[in-house]
Image (cartoon, rainbow, N blue to C red):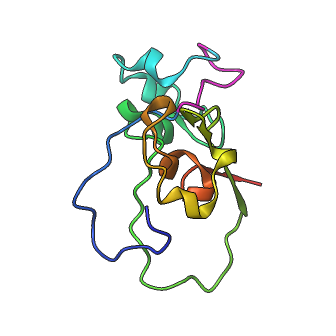
């Protein structure tokens, strides 16, 4: 990914990947189950619609409910005048590594050269905040 939003859609759409950090939270049926547990029963998208974990609903985290770790948001035409309602912080997907390379061992300059997929098939550009990836969570 680039650090500056593009004004045109990507020629290569991303593959849908369930958010590996999302599981059914406490208080819901099948507590602790991940997206892959429900993939053959789309009815769970409705049953667990209010199940929020890691600041995501099932509809935002699981491919079969039209969610994923990749969230395509078209760029705005101009910066907003008001700050975000909730600040966010970037968190690396953990544990992520590609051979001896981990998110914490990378620098912004090395990100351009470290492009091999690692844990979960993710590249550093998808998994590591320093490379423009990671996951943004409300703080």
Quadrant of the snapshot with the C terminus: bottom right
Residue situated in front as seen by the camera: 117 or 57: 117
Q: Main secondary structure of the magenta part?
A: loop
Residue situated in front as seen by the camera: 71 or 84: 71
Query: Could you tell whether 49 is left or right of 67 in the image?
Result: right
**Place of residue 121 in the rendered image (x, y in percent of width and height, measured from the top left):** 42, 33
**Place of residue 36 in the rendered image (x, y in percent of width and height, measured from the top left):** 44, 20
Task: Note whether 52 is above or below 73 in the view shown.
Answer: above
Query: Could you tell whether 11 is left or right of 58 in the image?
Result: left
Quadrant of the snapshot with the N terminus: bottom left
Q: Residue at x 53, y 21 (%)?
A: 34
Residue situated in front as seen by the camera: 18 or 33: 18
Q: Which residues are magenta?
A: 20-30
Quarter assignment of residue 129: bottom right
**Place of residue 99 in the rendered image (x, y in percent of width and height, measured from the top left):** 54, 32
Q: Residue at x 24, y 54 (%)?
A: 12
Q: Is residue 72 magenta?
A: no
Quarter assignment of residue 64: top left
Query: Could you tell whether 11 is left or right of 73 in the image?
Result: left
């Amino acid at each position: 990914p680039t650090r500056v939003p593009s004004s045109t859609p990507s020629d290569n759409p991303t593959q849908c990947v369930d958010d590996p950090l999302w599981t059914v939270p406490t208080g819901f049926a099948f507590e602790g189950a991940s997206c892959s547990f429900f993939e053959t029963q789309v009815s769970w998208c409705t049953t667990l619609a209010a199940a929020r974990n890691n600041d995501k609903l099932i509809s935002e985290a699981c491919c079969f409910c039209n969610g994923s770790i990749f969230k395509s948001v078209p760029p705005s035409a101009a910066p907003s005048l008001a700050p975000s309602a909730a600040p966010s912080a970037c968190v690396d997907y953990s544990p992520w590594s590609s051979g001896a390379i981990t998110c914490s061992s990378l620098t912004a300059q090395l990100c351009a050269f470290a492009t091999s997929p690692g844990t979960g098939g993710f590249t550093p550009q998808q998994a590591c905040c320093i490379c423009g990836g990671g996951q943004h969570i409300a703080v």
